Image: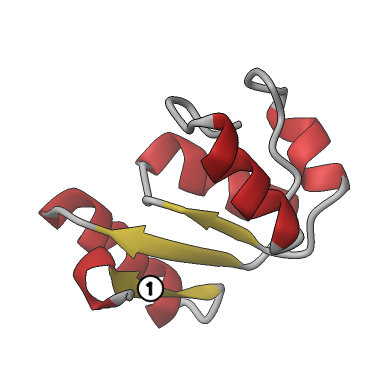
Amino acid sequence: YAQGASPAQQAELAKLGFLVEPQPIPFARIADRSRVVMSYGSLGFASSALATGLPSVTVHYDLEKTLTGQAITRLQLGGHVHVATIQ
């Protein structure tokens, strides 16, 4: 689900191999068909991802999400990157 994404942006994501849902879906469905989770690192979403055993990549933009990403990396459960470093 890509809230606010235009049809053109959704089509571009689809070309890259992403499945863009028309509305939010249950987390269990995401986990069932994923090998890795990428998120902004909100504590609830990151915790849900980690509870499934999936590795997690946090693309952070504020202090809370930075700390979440650092903790995930320190525990060797995934990695993190600041959103400003992505082109």
85 and 36: which one is in front?
85
Residue at image x 78%, y 64%? 35
| Residue drawn at (76%, 45%) of the image | 19
Give 85 or 70, whichever is nearer the viewer.
85
Q: How many marks?
A: 1
Way the structure is coloured: secondary structure
Give percent across and percent down for residue 31: 77, 45
Does 27 appear above or below 48? Answer: above
Q: Measuring 43% from the left and 26% from the top, which residue is drawn there?
A: 4
Question: Residue 87 appears in which quarter of the rendering?
Answer: bottom left
Q: Residue at x 39, y 80 (%)?
A: 74
Compared to residue 55, the image places residue 75 above or below, namely below
| Residue furthest front as drawn | 8
Q: Residue furthest left?
A: 63
Q: Quadrant of residue 36?
A: bottom right
Packing grade of label 1 (10 A; few <14, some 14-19, many >=20) is many
Residue 46: x, y in percent? 48, 48
Q: Position of residue 24 (x, y in %)?
A: 63, 21
Judge left or right: residue 75 versus residue 32: left
Three-letter amino acid code of the residue under disc 1: His
Q: Is residue 52 left or right of residue 24?
A: right
Return the x and y of residue 43 as percentages of the image width and height.
Answer: 38, 42
Q: Which residue is mark 1?
A: 80
Q: Residue lying farthest right?
A: 32
